[in-house]
Amino acid sequence: MLTAAACILAAYLCGSIATAVWVGRVVRGIDIREHGSGNAGATNVARVVGVPWGLLVGLIDILKGLVPVALLSSVVARGFGIGTAEAGLILGVAAIVGHLYPAFAGFKGGKGVLTALGVSLALLPIEAGIAALVWLGVFAIWRTVSLGSIVATIMFVAATLVHRLISGSNPPTSLVVMAFVIGVLVFVTHRSNIRRLMAGTESRFKRS
């Protein structure tokens, strides 16, 4: 039980790795949360610090969700006497909370989308892969990160539901609920982006 609890704490601390904040400080000597959109995420780093640094932040933010779930789910499952999927869900929530409220950066983090993607890749790899491809397609056409995130999230939830309807029991109910929770998280954290999209004022990456 104590080992399982320690794994959950480790997942939260992993999520708390303030990649965007640290890159902003090391590379530019700034607090990224005081520049650009004010979000401690890969997109804001790409705009303010540079695209290569934004890609690095994005990759690490994904790993923050993927690694704890992939490595620690079996330990938590044994410790609490629950299924591996449910254990992974608990660890995933801990990692996402860590990203949103990082202990290493004053509990003010990013929007959690990429960390949630990492969790999804560990628990629902097919559905997460489909969502990632949709994001790439939307971004390639409209060059708008937030639009890609919103459309990809809708596709992620839809793919999870279709998979469940086809198979009857897989993915388990807990992961279907997770997909909906991630969907709600994305829409809640992107409220301002949605308003700007509707007004036609959302920022786009220029084509090189």
Image (tube, rainbow, N blue to C red):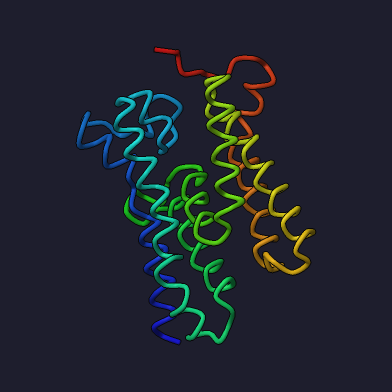
| Tag count | 0
Residue at 44%, 71% (x, y): give it.
8
Q: Where is residue 158 in the image (x, y as percent from the top left)?
A: 73, 47
**In which quadrant will I find the N terminus?**
bottom left
Q: Which residue lies furthest to the front in this view?
A: 166
Q: Which residue is more in the foreground, 89 or 172?
A: 172
Q: Where is residue 44 in the image (x, y as percent from the top left)?
A: 41, 29
- What is the quadrant of residue 170 in the picture? bottom right
* Image side of residue 103 versus residue 199, left or right: left
Q: Which residue is more in the foreground, 193 or 107?
A: 193
Q: Which residue is more in the foreground, 120 or 182?
A: 120
- What is the quadrant of residue 50 in the picture? top left
- What is the quadrant of residue 64 in the picture? bottom left
Residue at 34%, 26% (x, y): give it.
51
**In which quadrant will I find the C terminus?**
top left
Q: Is residue 172 above or below residue 33?
A: below
Q: In this view, does 199 lie above or below 104?
A: above
Q: Where is residue 29 in the image (x, y as percent from the top left)?
A: 21, 31
Q: Which residue is more in the foreground, 165 or 195?
A: 165
Q: Position of residue 120 (x, y in %)?
A: 54, 55
Residue at 30%, 26% (x, y): give it.
49
Q: In this view, does 41 lie above or below 117?
A: above
